[in-house]
Image (spheres, rainbow, N blue to C red):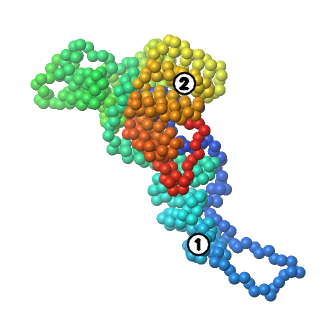
Amino acid sequence: MSDNVASESSWPTWKIALAVGIPVALAGVGFYYYTSRQSKPDEKETAARSEPEGSSYPPKQVQPDNETKVTSEPPTKQTKFQESQELKNEGNRLFKQSKYDEAIKKYSEAIEVCPEKNKTEKSTYHQNMAAALEKLENWEGVVKECSCAVALNQRYVKALHRRSKAFEKLGKKESCLEDITTVCILEGFQNSTTMVYADDILKKIGKEKASEKYKHRHPMMPSSLFIRQYFASFNDDLISIPLSDEQHLHAEHSGYIRARIALSEGKFVDVIPECSSEIESIDQPPEAADSTTNPDLSSYLAEALLMRGTFHLLTGNSALAKPDLDRVVDMKEANVKLRANALIKRGSMNMQLQDTAKAEDDFSLAVEIDPENSDVYHHRGQLHILLDKVDAALADFDKCISLKPDFAMAHAQRCYTVYRQAFTNKDRAEIEEAMNKFQTIIDDYPSCSETYGLFAQAQTDGANYEKADKLFQDAIKIEPENATLYVHRGLLALQWKQDLELAVNLITKALEVDEKCDFAHETMGTIEVQRGNLEKATKHFAVSIDYAKSELEMAHLFALQAAAIAQGSIAAKYGLRPPMPGAF
């Protein structure tokens, strides 16, 4: 899961992972190397880019005084350059009359006449011809003429911008991104119009690539820590209750029992096949039943379907998870806690698919069939955070805590919700109260690393970096195998001390702890972009993409990778790089 450090306007690490319901953060797509120095769109500048450059008429000649006027001197012979300028001016006049074909002819003649040494002017003629071709929607022609202009003047912003638009029309989004990124760099990231356009192209690239990849992706089992944390986010989960001694005795005849044993032993790859064995043995017609099957054993059909659906979600395969979860939800005879658990997971999956209405419906049904299930309120509270329904989220967390008073994670999440609301409203009294509450929760539940991490982010907001770092260190002592904690501490080192070496060392440690930590790969990829190691960056993004749990998250990562590739190409072609940020 992408688990990005919080900013003033974002929620932090514990946001619900839309694919499976575990608390982590999902960042929006955007040019991560953009600075915040954005100017308002310049309408005049935008309009100017659609017009040819130069006057429509030759400059007026200043007439000398009558006393000194000489009429007998023969006219001076035009140079080739002057002739080309007149042809360009005539082309501009025709352009303004919407006579684009005739204008193109004049620009072409100007290019032929113009001496090779006048590269700047010649590049303008090519760009003006591209403007006329653009009016005729001849996109291939626009690309050709803009390319000629850029070959003569590599810093030609107008030609690069026009070519980017033509590339988009031709469906060549990577080329479009490269050109518009070059424009952003040349403009010093001061023109919000081009930055918004670049960001839009980046999102489209990410979405298209993720859509294709997600359809044909191979399921990727997450780390054992991730799976443990996921199941720890549920209290009323029947498939997590330890097996009895009697159940263990029936492992030979029950695929579900074997799946539960595999889960307890960390043999996660065996869970789905063993659940399938249970489901198939029950679904088969009576005459096909295995003679070794014990008819006295209880049916674990609902449990097996729920566990298999859960692991399909954990591997990022929502297409296979859905029918299993649907079937459990529709089993009226099944235990309501199994059905409620399936609804929670299906609701989280629907949120990941950006169908918020269905997600809310699933949680409402879960409340209806099992109103005393603390998990429903815990996970719906996180859903409400994503939907910016803070009051509803707080009400859900309160209900969860009333049902499970010792659920430390719910206490921590509620406290952070109150803090973020106070921070957004700049309510100093509420902020201080939330800070004191964090310390109380730590005192009451000292082994919950989640609280330390959230408290650390609150301290970071207040620039209390030393306290935040100490809290991250305390969290790591509690949960040393949690790779994301090392990454957050590394990001803090960048923000606090601009200590790139320490940040890299901490993120490297995260990857040693968990080589499947996509958050660590994503962050390292971003750092490598800033260091100019673009090949390394794209490799880290590729790994992160493979372990992404949702199409939405995958689109974000593909966008980051596309931006890195574009920067590498720009650096090679033009020797340009975006400015290094003062803080990460």
The kind of secondary structure element at disc 2 is: helix
| Residue 467 on image: x %, y % | 57, 22
| Cα distance in 3D space between marks 2 and 1 | 61 Å
Instruction: Indicate whether 180 appears above or below 522.
Output: below
Q: Are marks 2 and 1 in contact (CB under 8 Å)?
A: no
542 sits to left or right of 59: left
Q: Which residue is mark 2?
A: 469
Q: What's the amino acid at mark 2?
A: Asp
| Residue 41 on image: x %, y % | 64, 50
What is the residue that sits farthest to the front in this orientation? 501
At 86% across and 77% down in the image, what residue appears?
65
Q: Which residue is mark 1?
A: 116
At 65% across and 22% down in the image, what residue appears?
428
Crowd around label 2: few <14 · some 14–19 · many ≥20 (10 Å):
many
Instruction: Indicate whether 283 appears above or below 188.
Output: above
| Residue 446 on image: x %, y % | 48, 14
| Residue 149 on image: x %, y % | 56, 65
Q: Quadrant of residue 112?
A: bottom right
Instruction: Indicate whether 419 appears above or below 215.
Output: above
251 sits to left or right of 531: left
What is the residue that sits farthest to the bottom in this orientation? 72
Quarter of the C terminus within the rendering: top right
At 48% across and 55% down in the image, what residue appears?
175
Q: Quadrant of residue 101?
A: bottom right
Q: What's the amino acid at mark 1?
A: Glu
Question: Residue 279 got which mark?
Answer: none
What is the residue that sits farthest to the right in this orientation? 67
* Along the viewing direction, whichever of 110 and 194 lies nearer the viewer: 110
